[in-house]
Amino acid sequence: MWDTYSSGEDKAPRADVGRLVKWGILAAMGIVIFAVASNQAVNLLLNLTEFGNAYSKTLYYSITSGLALAAIALVRVNVASRHSIVWYSISLIARFVKRNSDFEAPSRPARYSDFHMSPLSFGLWQATKVVILAPLFANIGFGMAIAYMAEGNDIGISSVGSIFSIPFATVPADNGAFAQENVIPAIPVLALLVPPLIGAIGIRLLVYVGVSGAVNIVSQYMVDSAEHKPKFLSYISTVEVIVGAAIFWAGFTLFFSAGIDFNTKYLIAGALALGAALIFYGFMDKRRARVIIYPPRRHVYLRLLTVAAVVAIVGSIVAVNTSIAEAKKVEWRGPYISQEIAVNRNMAELDKVSVVNYDVKPPSVAPANIPQMVNANRDTLNNIRLWDQEAATQKLKPELGQRNDIVFADTDMLRFSGTMYWTGTTTPKLPDTVAQGTEWFNRHLVYTHAIPGFKMLEADTGNIVSESKFFPQERIYYGESGDEGLFSRSWSAYPVGRTTSDEISQFFYNGTGGIDVSPPISWMFEPNFMLSYPDTPIHIMRYKDIHDRMDLLYPYFVYDFAFSNDDTVAPIFHKVGVLPVTDGKNTYWLMPLVAALDTSHVPWGSPFMLKLVGYSLIDTYNGDVKIIVTGNDKFSDIFYDQYKGLGATRDVPHWLDQQIRYPEEMFIWKIAKFNRYHVTDPKAFIEARQFYDIPKDGSKDIPPYYIMTKPQGFDSPQFVGFQSLELSGSSTKNLVGYMIVENDLSTLGKMTFYSVPLDSATKLIGPSAAKEALEKDKEYKNVKTLLQGNPRVGENILYRIGDQEVYFIPVYTANTSGGVVSQIGTIAAVGASVTGTFNVGLGDNPVQAFENYLLKAAGQQPTDVTPGGQGTTTGGGGGGAPAPTTLDVQDRIDAIERVFSDAGVQVIKPTAISSPLEFKEAGATYKADTDFKLVQEAIAKFMQDNPPDNGRVYEWQDENKVNFGVLKVSGGIVENHYISIEVS
């Protein structure tokens, strides 16, 4: 058959397909890069315009850190060879395409070692790699630390040198003094700089030793096979270098291992020696491979013998040491355990936790002293948290009314003037009934905010209160999203200069949130604006979810948390808790700024360390962010130094003093550390008999509670975080004590552990035992049959009332046929300090329940309890205390008014009273004659602290309470300071 390609006719010149392929690949890469860049350009421009320096600073740290780490990982320094795996692969593809298109005989494959880029191309490619891949290496903490050091500051670089001597040092049994001297000063460097540097260097070795070596072997073998001259010794030499480098690097990273012990020095020495030997053999064999094809048997035996010798020597030493340490754990492992304890206690600041011996007394009280004990502790009994989060949320839901466009995103515990409130925060949602085709319009232009933003009830009584008394600014444009909210899913917008509003309730937003975007940028942001508003600027509000907003501006911190003690169960992540707070005019979100630092390379350290840097105040209406730094650790210092020029401050506003709260996430993490590292004796730590656990409710850990209580050593009830603890692995489930954390600004974060001696004759039962005691109580069984629907037992929270340890357990029922809205059917007071007998008192309120508990503990007959009714004393002997006398409500109010009149103060009863700021200064309960003396004392103290300037107090009633207030003017703002007395 005639072959046109073998004829002598002139043929038209064929295109260089290989060149076309190369340019095609370059063009494709350019198009991809351009598309990605243009897609991000608009958002980048909007971010820089809206957020200014706050955004550009994080961008600067990301760019500098990414470029630095990418250069370490990817830039080749062998200018003489000028290899490139990527361009070598591209050249192979071009050869393959050209060969097939030209129907030519296969050309000889090129060796990777023979491929060289031109000097200019090589240099440009190194820069291109770094720029393109820098985002993958960005580490904003690394970038901020480098910037901090560039300004002449020190983070402890000089202390890193001591890390290399630790594995070879004789670690003393010195209660952690060795670690405090050699490890703890280096923690900032080991947490901020070492992890990204080790990662970058590891990637460099993987790519340029491992992958490059493998490509070199394969390409060389293909060429050699085509020439029928395989050079096995050359391949083996490359493998030796790859394996040797990997072993050497593994040995080097052991210097930064968290598990340093008596064997580490042998493992390091063995790994470094073996790695160096294999690298040496590799280079030697590479020279021999020029003239030798197959490795001599003697050389093979030598290498195998070297590997076997090192493994055998190190392995035998490790095995012998481990065997000895099994029999002499304290002598051998004790010194290292001491260092582990010291390092982890420093990370979690456990040395600042106060440990108090808990004086648990048996539940005994003389019957004659019961009224006195009850009256002396009414300040605590009137602040018992009876409504848990679930019950509060269910009761608050109907307060939203007939609304299908807002839902509760979260329900948080707040405190104002010594009173706790469950506060449901709302978020806008798209109604399920929105017609198809109108979702975009409703999502972006109509349902732009939530109003009302909050619903509140008292945590002790369950009474609904007006949120406007606390939060004058109720419209939420920036907030939480929850599971259904729009803030995290959508931006909102409106045309600039609008005369009508499409927003919910036709509201016109007039805040400072968002930016005006003019065409054509508005078209690029949202193509719909090209047709609907072709020549009108659009005001766009983005990042309306406060967690997303903070993650964009301050990505140094953690905004998603998950805690789990069960490795078999996947942890459930939740957003970091935020609280609504107010300065009396504006409403803000108080978000804790918690940094999670990588401490996996800290000798004897944990995988990570949490640090509370401070808080952010995020305006719910304008979206403005104010940073308050409260931490005193090195990372907090670095962050404050870099951001003080952008408004970060260490001054906490005075109005936040009684609203701030220590973050639950930090509390949980510190307790988890305390449960293990409260044990400071190495022997006891090894024996593992004194570790603690968080009690469980079923399969879940019982979370911390935030309550008003008066622990041992406190003069008055305080708002604290509370977490009970039990002995790990104990079958009795008795408590070993409980931890509290204080929340007032002056003592914020101060933790105290009340420890029950293990040999105490009086035991402190756990929550599960308390609930079991309630279920078995005969009186409760009788009362339960009278409760409506399916009663639900609420949270069982431990309180110290006087010298008595008592669980207060509410039992909820439904007061609607749907069973949605909860009410309290009865309240149980279960004695927590027991010597063998469980005492349970029931009542319609905490005072009655506690009184009945004391009567039972004293062997007396308690008052009868009728769910929803008044208690009466039962017949029979025993000398039970009489039930409190029930007075007429108006009579009690008249008696209170006479207290003020006798003090020369006029009581004024306005039709309505309202002031910008209201402060509940005191509270009392007046339901029986025995309460009157305490009411008089409370009024006297209130008058002493808040003397009326004009000799008048203002009276108004709020459901079951009567309030008396004094109006004052401070800084031009009227303040209402009042006392609230429950009379029914």
Image: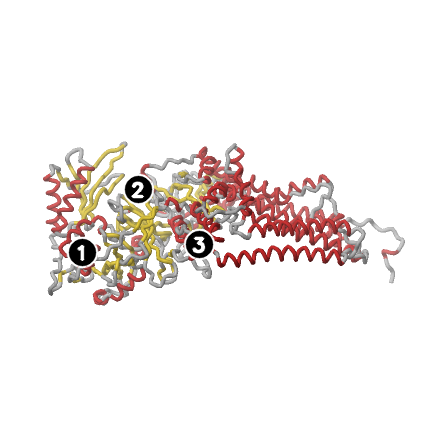
Q: Which residue was labeled with disc 2?
A: 658
Asked if labels 3 and 2 touch by Cβ distance under 8 angstroms, the answer is no
Q: CA distance from mark 2 to mark 3?
A: 29 Å
Residue at left 13%, top 45%?
896
Q: Amino acid at mark 1?
A: Val
Q: CA distance from mark 3 to mark 1?
A: 47 Å
Label placed on residue 870: none
Q: Which residue was labeled with disc 3?
A: 573
Q: Position of residue 488 (x, y in %)?
A: 44, 49
**Of helix, strand and loop, which one carries label 1?**
loop
Q: Quadrant of the N terminus?
A: bottom right
The answer to whether residue 562 of the structure is visible from this angle is yes
The answer to whether residue 542 of the structure is visible from this angle is no
Q: Position of residue 931 (x, y in %)?
A: 14, 49
Could you say which is closer to the camera, residue 557 or residue 647?
557
Asked if labels 1 and 3 touch by Cβ distance under 8 angstroms, the answer is no
Q: Amino acid at mark 2?
A: Gln
Q: Which residue was labeled with disc 1?
A: 365
**Of helix, strand and loop, which one carries label 2?**
loop
Could you say which is closer to the camera, residue 690 or residue 965?
690
**Total residue callouts:** 3
The earlier-in-sequence mark between 3 and 1 is 1
Q: Position of residue 840 (x, y in %)?
A: 23, 61
Q: Is residue 593 above or below residue 834?
A: above
The earlier-in-sequence mark between 2 and 1 is 1
The earlier-in-sequence mark between 2 and 3 is 3
